[in-house]
Image: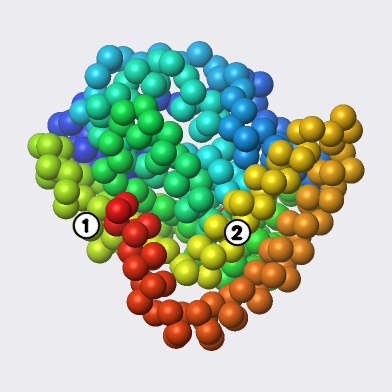
Amino acid sequence: MDRFTAPLVEAGVTVETVVVRPNPGFPFPWTSDTFFGEMPDCVLSVPRGLEPFSLGATRYDLIILGYTPWFLSPSIPTNSLLQDPAFQSVLKDTPVITVTGCRNMWISAHIRLRKSLEDRGARLVGNIALVDRHLNLVSLLTIMHWLFGGKKDRWRNILPVPGVSQTDIDRMSDYGRLVLPALAGDWSGLQPALVGAGAVDVKPHLLFIERNGARIFGIWANVIVRKGNRKPWLRAFKWYIMFALFLLGPLVYLITQLIIRPLFYRKVNSVRKHYLYLN
Ligand SMILES: Cc1cc2nc3c(=O)[nH]c(=O)nc-3n(C[C@H](O)[C@H](O)[C@H](O)COP(=O)(O)O)c2cc1C
């Protein structure tokens, strides 16, 4: 986010940074229980406490919202922020650029985030998604090493460094430069410029996994919150997710690449464009 706003600051734009922290915070590194235990509340948008934060103005020309997806939904801190009255009041009639940093599955979360923003009267004018560009299975292993082991390093010097690459983070200042001309009030060219610069991409096979996954997570979440003892159900969800990611994921990849993409090229392309260009 700092790199993204750096060109704006250099150009003399007043940039206010507000860091929103959950209170109580989430434990890091995660354990299997703490990680999967957050799924129902996250998927069902149950808000939590936030540390008090203050906004320096009552109106902004632009809000840049950085967030992470959790369980194919906006994370609990993001959901909590969206339900905060002070934040809601500045969203009204304000252009918003969303920036996500995630493993690689952000679209379902973005669909929900976009709806929340629009319900609050904000106008989405740009979207950037920074992802781990390694193969889905590789990034799954490395992020598990990072989130459960607590270290963002190479597992036994075999796997790559987890997360968004430094090159991609550095590129954020190029994307920030694209915002400058739009600040005058014409936002129509921003998203095409961001897409052209590589700030966001949509992978059809991940889209397919996500859209089905988000629906199924919703069912799991609704079942689990009704149970007195959530533990065995959360454990079952954990095994479901492992099965889906490690076994169904590669299968869906093969089917998408070999059958769906060649046969339904136009349809896949139009869905891809729909999410890329915020249509
Ligand atoms: C509880 C939890 C759930 C996550 N779910 C997703 C997900 O659905 N899709 C995704 O691409 N990344 C997911 N991630 C990865 C995060 O989006 C993010 O990349 C990672 O936590 C690193 O960012 P951080 O340092 O801000 O936590 C998840 C992370 C956590 C902690």
Q: Quadrant of residue 29?
A: top right
Task: Give residue 4's position: percent from left, percent from top.
Answer: 31, 44
Q: Is residue 73 left or right of residue 182?
A: right
Q: Is residue 125 visible?
A: yes
Q: Which residue is mark 1?
A: 193
Question: For the residue marked with disc 2, what is the amino acid?
Answer: Asn
Question: For the residue marked with disc 1, what is the amino acid?
Answer: Ala
The structure's colour scheme is: rainbow
Helix, strand or loop for disc 1? helix
* Disc ID at residue 245: none
| Above or below, comparing residue 21 to residue 224 in the picture | above
Q: Residue at x 30, y 40 (%)?
A: 124
Residue sitting nearer the eye, 71 or 22: 71
Q: Is residue 172 visible?
A: no
| Above or below, comparing residue 262 to residue 253 in the picture | below
For the residues labelled 2 and 1, say whether their Cβ atoms are less than 8 Å apart: no
Q: Which residue is mark 2?
A: 212
Asked whether mark 2 and ligand 1 are closer than 8 Å, the reply comes as no
Q: Is residue 215 left or right of residue 6?
A: right
Q: What is the total number of numbered labels drawn onto the structure image? A: 2
| Above or below, comparing residue 256 to residue 195 in the picture | below
Task: Give residue 176's position: percent from left, percent from top.
Answer: 26, 46
| Above or below, comparing residue 228 to residue 275 in the picture | above
Q: Residue at x 38, y 65 (%)?
A: 272
